[in-house]
Amino acid sequence: MSRSDTPPLPTKDRLIRSAAHLFRRHGYNGVGLNDLLDQASAPKGSLYHHFPNGKSDLAIAAATWASDEMLRLMAASFSPADSFEAGLTTLCHKLAKLFDLSGMADGCPVSGALFDGPNNDLFRNTADHIFEGWITEAEHVARGFGAPPDQARRDAELFFMLLQGGWTLARARGSSDVLRELPNQFSRS
Amino acid sequence: MSRSDTPPLPTKDRLIRSAAHLFRRHGYNGVGLNDLLDQASAPKGSLYHHFPNGKSDLAIAAATWASDEMLRLMAASFSPADSFEAGLTTLCHKLAKLFDLSGMADGCPVSGALFDGPNNDLFRNTADHIFEGWITEAEHVARGFGAPPDQARRDAELFFMLLQGGWTLARARGSSDVLRELPNQFSRS
């Protein structure tokens, strides 16, 4: 047993997390199979056992894992909040901290895995499905705080676009300030 | 002379435009030198004559060219408009048309050239400089329509984030509708 409190991760989990990390930093086409295997300390055979189509299966798994983490961050931020804006403020501060920890160079893990690679329907549909998942969750939260259906949907789409656009600007500036200030843009409405 | 009304482009221009097209679709790491030379019908020697550092010089030139096109689109949209919102509506319709023409698969040409490649300061600083150019131009337009300085700056940053986030969502959905609806998000304020 490791002395650390966190149990060691199985190879499949290590592969997925390494892929999410590498794709968001270098884009799908900037990552080779050997980079993935090195980073995960995994043998090639186990990659193809868990992901028969290799890198493209791993990209889908990595984007899905990163998206699930995002949904957990959203739940942890919005559940204890007493307004949509308060939950958004908590979420933006958490994202800013993650951005700083990443060395301020990482992009969106979903776009990095799925848009910078082959332009195929599977990748695009997966990205669409993931992003709609975030938007639907934000819409659900907004409804829970009493927003009428039309406004909740529009708020949720604005939420998504601010996070994506804000992250891009933070990356260009090399500063997480823009993420912490996103709630001011949202609450202009 | 060609019979077409547009004069033939010199090799340097063909290289820059081909690079902008390929990088925004496949990302920096997804494009090889031979792809660039093929698409531009250019010999390798002329690439290194115009761009001594090869692909990385070309990425900077392509992102700068694409940014200049964006600034021209902004000027053509905002100059004849009688409000910021009217100019934004025109711009979003022009961008939606470009998105449709591109086959709905292209990303931001600046991010594609500069973020999906090597994480170096030159690329990041160039992206920052380009994006600040768009934001400063939008801020200038907003000031011209009478917005106070603080609001003009905030409007301009919202403008940038909506365009970036909206384009990402349009790409995932495979639909330009989200771009045409961006002005509704902006004018909630």
Image (spheres, coloured by chain):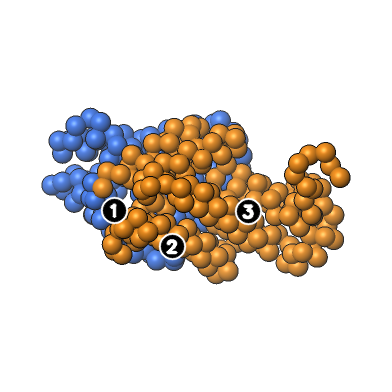
Chain colours: A blue, B orange
Instruction: Report the residue that reaches farthest toward the left.
Output: A82
Which residue in the protein does label 1 denote? A185
Which residue in the protein does label 2 denote? B136
Residue B189 on image: x %, y %: 26, 47
Residue drawn at 55 percent across, 45 percent down: B107
Q: Quadrant of residue A26?
A: bottom right
On the same chain: label 3 and label 2?
A: yes
Q: In which quarter of the image is residue B26?
A: top right
Q: Which mark is residue B12?
A: none
Residue drawn at 70 percent across, 55 percent down: B16
Q: Which of A22 and B27 is in front in this view?
A: B27
Q: Badge 1 local density, few (<14 within 10 Å), some, or many (20+)?
A: some
Q: Badge 2 local density, few (<14 within 10 Å), some, or many (20+)?
A: some
**Residue mark closest to the camera, 3 vs 2:** 2
Amino acid type at mark 3: Tyr
Amino acid type at mark 1: Gln
Sequence-wise, the earlier of marks 3 and 2 is: 3
CA distance for labels 3 and 1: 31 Å
User: Label 3: chain?
Assistant: B
Residue drawn at 61 percent across, 44 percent down: B25
Q: Quadrant of the N terminus of chain A?
A: bottom left
Which residue in the protein does label 3 denote? B28
